Structures are given as C-alpha cells and as structure tokens.
C-alpha cells in the first residue's frame, strides 16, 4: 500500500470516528424542555435537572450560633433565575437554590412546573433573613 492510499484510509477512519463521536457522545439536541413547556421534551421523555452542589449557605442566629447549613445551587444568571426550580421532582431537605436578583426590592417567582414544595427565604443585602414563605 502506498502513502497516498494509507493517508486516504486514515482520513476516512478519522472522519468515521468524528461522525460516531458526534452521533453518540456529543448530544446534538437537548431533551430539556423550554421553560414554557409542559415538562416533556420533543422526544417525549421528561427531563429532571440534577442538583449541582455549588456551595454552602450557613444560617446563623443573631448570637452567632450556626442554625443550619444548606448545600446550594446558584441561580446567578438571567436564564438560571428564570428556569430556577422548574421540573425538579425531588430535593433533599438540606439542598436549596440561591437566587441573586440584582437588586433589593420585593420579588415574586413564577412557579410553573415546580413540583416540589418549597420554603422561600428572602435575604437582604446585609445577609439578614427578612421573610420566610413556607410551602410556597
């Protein structure tokens, strides 16, 4: 076999491998529904986001005693804030999502497609809990 033939065969194998890689390993489409969707992706499968532990939130009393430590996922971009807790069907008691809203003012949340009961703590810029909404 001459060098040209080997180069052509190597190129064909490389292209076949890249094609296989794109078809099986790298997802071409997302099964994640749009925030306005009904919870089913276009393929008919349901999507449930997995909790991402991105830090800890430590709740401390006025006397400085640790009351509770919560593993948190951060909602710190407009897309993450909009999507929030949608499509979550379960969450551990010591897990939560921390929303960075950008400004201190009364906030409201769109709870469509939120399947778990939530307690919402509103925390001001001084780090003080100013309101708790149970089972929201």
Image: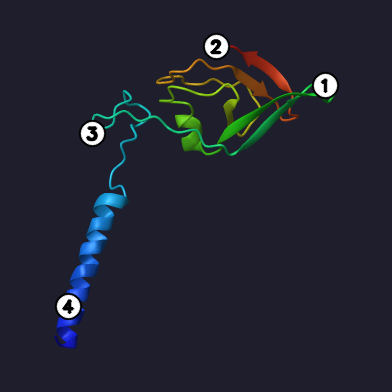
Give how far apart the Cα atoms at labels 3 and 2 are: 32 Å
> Does label 4 or label 3 sit earlier along the sequence?
4
| Mark closer to the observer (4, 2) | 4
Cα gap from disc 1 to disc 3, whole angstroms:
51 Å
Query: What residue would you read off at disc 1?
Result: 62
Give the CA separation, mark 1 to mark 2: 25 Å
Residue 86 locus on image (x, y percent): 43, 26
First in sequence: mark 3 or mark 2? 3
Q: How far apart are marks 1 and 4 (CA)?
A: 73 Å
Please report whichever mark, 4 or 2, sits nearer to the chain's N-terminal start: 4
Mark 4–mark 3 CB contact (< 8 Å): no
Mark 3 falls on what kind of element?
A: loop
User: For the residue labelled by badge 4, is the local secondary structure a helix, a strand or a loop?
Assistant: helix
Residue 65 image offset from top left, x and y in percent: 81, 24
Ranked by sequence position, the earlier of labels 1 and 4 is 4
Residue mark closest to the camera, 1 vs 4: 4
- Which corner quadrant holds the N terminus? bottom left
Q: Is residue 17 visible?
A: yes
Point out residue 88 in the picture as x, y percentages from the top left corner: 44, 25
Q: Nearer the viewer, mark 4 or mark 3?
A: 4
Query: What count of labels does the image hold?
Result: 4
Decide: marks 1, 2 in contact (CB < 8 A)? no
Give the labeled residue for mark 3.
Answer: 43
Q: Which residue is drawn at 24% across and 52% down?
A: 23
Q: Do the residues bearing badges 3 and 2 touch, measured as CB atoms within 8 Å?
A: no
Say which mark, if any, is on residue 135: 2
Check disc 1 and report its element: helix, strand or loop. Answer: loop
Q: Earlier in the sequence, mark 1 or mark 3?
A: 3
Marks 4 and 2, Cα distance to the nearest angstrom?
64 Å
Q: Mark 4 points at which residue?
A: 8
Density class for disc 1 (Cα within 10 Å; few <14, some 14-19, many ≥20) is: few
Q: Earlier in the sequence, mark 1 or mark 2?
A: 1
């Amino acid at each position: 076999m001459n060098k040209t033939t080997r180069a052509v065969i190597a190129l064909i194998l490389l292209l076949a491998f890249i094609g296989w890689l794109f078809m099986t390993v790298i997802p071409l489409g997302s099964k994640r529904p749009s925030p306005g969707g009904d919870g089913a992706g276009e393929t008919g499968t349901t999507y449930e986001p997995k909790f991402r532990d991105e830090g800890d939130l430590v709740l401390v009393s006025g006397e400085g005693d640790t009351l509770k430590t919560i593993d948190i996922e951060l909602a710190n971009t407009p897309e993450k804030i909009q999507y929030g807790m949608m499509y979550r069907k379960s969450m551990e008691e010591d897990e939560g999502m921390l929303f960075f809203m950008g400004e201190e003012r009364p906030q409201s949340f769109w709870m469509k497609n939120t399947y778990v009961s939530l307690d919402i703590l509103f925390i001001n810029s001084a780090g003080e809990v100013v309101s708790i909404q149970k089972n929201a």
